[in-house]
Image: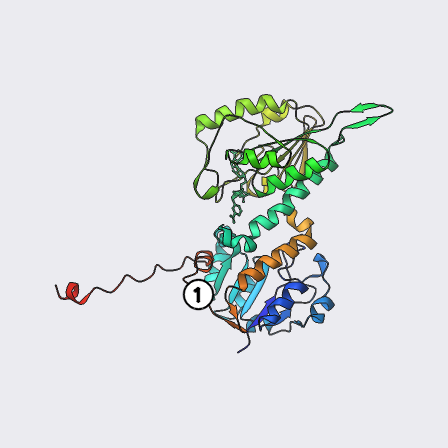
Amino acid sequence: MTVEILVLKETAAGERRVAATPETVKKLIALGAKVELEADAGRSAGFPDRLYLDVGATLADAGSRERADLVVCVQAPPVETIARLKSGATLIGTLHPAADPARAEALQARGLINFPLERLPRTTRAQAMDVLSSQAGMAGYKAVLIAAELTPRFFPMLTTAAGTIRPSKVLIVGAGVAGLQAIATAKRLGAQVEGFDVRPETREQIESLGGKFLDLGVSAAGEGGYARQLTDAERAEQQVRLADHLKNIDVIVCTAAVPGRPAPRIITTAMVEGMKPGSVIVDLAAETGGNCELTQPGQTIEHGGVVVAGPLNLASMGAVHASEMYARNVFNFAALFLKDGELDFDWEDELLAKTRWPDMPPPPAPAPTTAAASE
Ligand code: NAD
């Protein structure tokens, strides 16, 4: 039986992205699937329905949600939508089940095969499916553009008839995927860029983008390439050195995160009060509480002449390219189990087994040998 795939229209406030583009729909159809699209699903990402119909998709009807074998989305659908999906259907998206108990219950109640893509193991093989990386790239880029918009200064050095303008000093806090893209973007705009991170290997990455590594004398490399939480003593040392350094910084873009935990609080109110008036902080970590103590998620405030912005869902601001990357990530993941128009899961594949939620049950213990059994 030909597998039916449904592309959901996102309903979360401000969400402009879509989980499949005409390019990936064409590829899904080439793998033998039938693809249905909820009306206007791609419109705010720059992909009107007709582009999908041109590559062979059809528009969803009233029964599509109950019928689809595989449903793709960007953010988790509302509980009422999940409740309508076919029992046993497969759902791919950034589902964040732990963020909402009602959603977690609904995802389990339907017996769905849930693939929250944020759970994907970050191995080399998984890179083409890594939505955290692809969307963080857009977020880091947009964060710098927001900072450039908010600052009352130029980013680049200018030599003008009215004298020389010094370049802005931009500090990027956290040099993961978003932070590195932020460094590259600020550099392209001509700023003097510094980056800092607690993982020592980021020094080389920051420098390769033309940034300067800000060494605060604290290293916190953790498991799997991520940062670990700092000890109190390490944090205190980091804080003292940073406070002093920030007095000369014009723009800070915060991107520091520790997986599964609230964002580390790095920039205190006292530090902000020590900065020059007219300085700007854009806190990309606002979604998980913020790296700056003053950050208010979704708002831009001013404190003692320093502007602190906490924009949310920055990837959605670049919906065209963010959707193109997200949709390719989804396609590459779906291609692991979509074969000849059918869904065929290899649970020995760690990308499938470890992404699936709830956790897969451990494999059954080997049966006792006859000799042992007879003892
Ligand atoms: P993230 O969003 O979890 O964290 C962002 C950055 O914040 C990290 O670089 C982290 O070290 C830093 N940070 C945490 N606490 C900090 C503190 N107190 N002060 C300063 N910085 C702090 O991370 P991410 O961007 O999703 O990924 C981090 C790393 O994971 C990557 O740079 C890479 O090495 C690895 N990764 C691997 C793959 C892959 O192989 N498929 C894909 C993506 C990422």
On the image, numbered disc 1 is attached to which residue? 346
Q: Can residue 281 be seen in this view?
A: yes
Q: Quadrant of the C terminus?
A: bottom left
Across and down, in percent, residue 55 comes to 69, 70
**Dot 1 surroundings within 10 Å: few (below 14), some, or many (20 or more)?**
few
Q: Can residue 310 be seen in this view?
A: no
Q: Which residue lies furthest to the bottom in this view?
A: 1
Image height of 146 relative to 152, above or below? below
- Asked whether 320 or 310 is in front, the reply is 320
Identity of the residue drawn at 75% across and 31% down: 156
Q: In which quarter of the image is residue 10?
A: bottom right
Of helix, strand and loop, which one carries label 1?
loop
Q: Check the image and name the residue furthest to the right.
A: 161
Residue shown at the point (44%, 25%) measured from the top left: 233
Pick the front one: 27 or 319: 27
The x, y position of residue 335, in whole percent, is 54, 64
